[in-house]
Image (cartoon, rainbow, N blue to C red):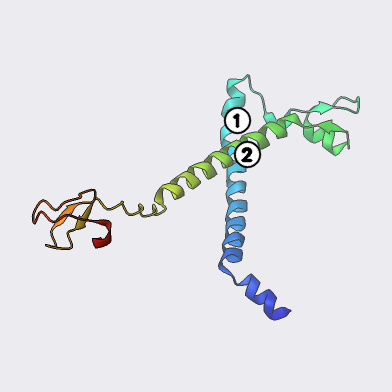
Amino acid sequence: MLKEFKEFAMKGNVLDMAIGIIIGAAFGRIVSSAVSDILMPPIGLLLGKVNFSNLYLNLSGGQYASFADAKAAGAATINYGLFINAVIDFVIVAFVIFLMVRQINRLKRQPAPAPAEPTTKNCPFCATEIPIKANRCPHCTSELRAQHL
């Protein structure tokens, strides 16, 4: 069983998938940081100095100055600001993956076109190339029957 597992783990598809997951996780962290640290602050400033990570709905009934205070107090909250950040992260990652797949599909080798149907044949009497639908050879004037071809 150990030998079978080793063969399975060493297959190209499994290794490719593992590498893709590791790179995808690292890329996801980069995008999350870009969204929360670079993209959202200017958007929040344009929308009236809003910090999206501090947007929450308090379900506990108490008053808290920030999301961090509510979290420290153990208050039940709906963190819709963090959800907005996660949605923007997802959209960016999905768009980048779309662009990558699109580019990879363009680079894939196109299948060879199917061979075209023949349009000519050789006369069995004079070996001259003639149209496939010809009943008589225009060069040697031999009558072409189905038995000759």
84, 132: nearer the viewer: 132
Q: Please, is residue 72 above or below residue 138 in the view?
A: above
Q: Residue furthest top?
A: 48
The three-letter amino acid code for the residue at tag 2 is: Phe
> Which of the two discs, 2 and 1, sits closer to the camera?
2
Determine which residue is flagged by label 1. Answer: 41
Q: Earlier in the sequence, mark 2 or mark 1?
A: 1
Q: Secondary structure at mark 2?
A: helix
Looking at the image, residue 96 lies above or below residue 79: below
Residue 119 picture location, percent across and down: 24, 50
The residue lying toward the viewer, choosing from 6 and 57, is: 6
Location of the N terminus by quadrant is bottom right
Three-letter amino acid code at the position of disc 1: Pro
- Identified at 14% across, 63% down, the residue is 125
User: In this orientation, does residue 36 appear?
Assistant: no
Spatial CA distance of label 2 from label 1 is 18 Å
Residue at the spot 88% in from the left edge and 37% down from the top edge: 74
**Secondary structure beneath label 1:** helix
Across and down, in percent, residue 121 comes to: 21, 56
Please tell me in which quadrant of the rendered image residue 17 appears.
bottom right
Task: Depth check: give the residue in front, 26 or 65.
Answer: 26
The residue that label 2 is drawn on is 90
The local crowd at label 1, few if under 14, some if 14 to 19, many if 20 or more residues have their Cα within 10 Å, is some
Left or right side of 10 for 83: right
Res 42 → quadrant: top right
Seen at 78% across and 28% down, the residue is 56
Location of residue 18 in the rendering, given as x and y in whole percent from the top left corner: 61, 61
Across and down, in percent, residue 69 comes to 82, 33
The image's mark for residue 31 is none
